[in-house]
Amino acid sequence: MNPAEARDVPWIMYIPIIITSIGVVIAEVGAVVWAYRDARKRRRSGILVAVLVAMSFPWGLAIWLIARPNIRPRDDPFWKREDHRASYMQRKEDA
């Protein structure tokens, strides 16, 4: 295809490429944000994990999902709030 023919391609032909590119960018940003928050919740370096996921997406996300440490209930911020712990214990006693 010579340059003159390339100018004759209708712009509508590029819409699927643009939509796919936007979708990939949104997925990558979402994965980076999720990985950062997940790492912080697990008491790991959120920045380091976010950089790993961003620089090697999607493989970095797969590596984090496989290698991330288990979270213990006492480390979960949800359980640090007294009202949640008390309501859980109350429901456990009622059952």
Image (spheres, helix red, strand yellow):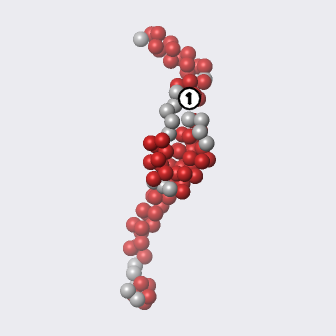
Which sits in the foreground, 60 or 29? 60
Q: Is residue 27 visible?
A: no
Tell me the quadrant of the picture where the N terminus can be found: bottom left
Outermost residue, top side: 93
Which sits in the foreground, 50 or 27? 50
Residue drawn at x 43%, y 63% is: 19
Q: Position of residue 92 (x, y in %)?
A: 46, 13
Query: Where 76 falls versus 85 (above or below)?
Result: below
Residue drawn at x 50%, y 39% is: 68
Find disc 1 in the rendering and name its residue: 76
Q: Position of residue 7 (x, y in %)?
A: 44, 85
Residue drawn at x 57%, y 28% is: 75
Q: Residues within 10 Å of mark 1 (few under 14, many from 20)?
A: few
Which sits in the foreground, 76 or 87? 76
Q: Which secondary structure, mark 1?
A: loop
Residue drawn at x 46%, y 43% is: 65
Query: Where 33 falls versus 11 (above or below)?
Result: above
Q: Position of residue 2 (x, y in %)?
A: 40, 89
Q: Position of residue 18 (x, y in %)?
A: 45, 66
Three-letter code for the amino acid on which mark 1 is drawn: Asp
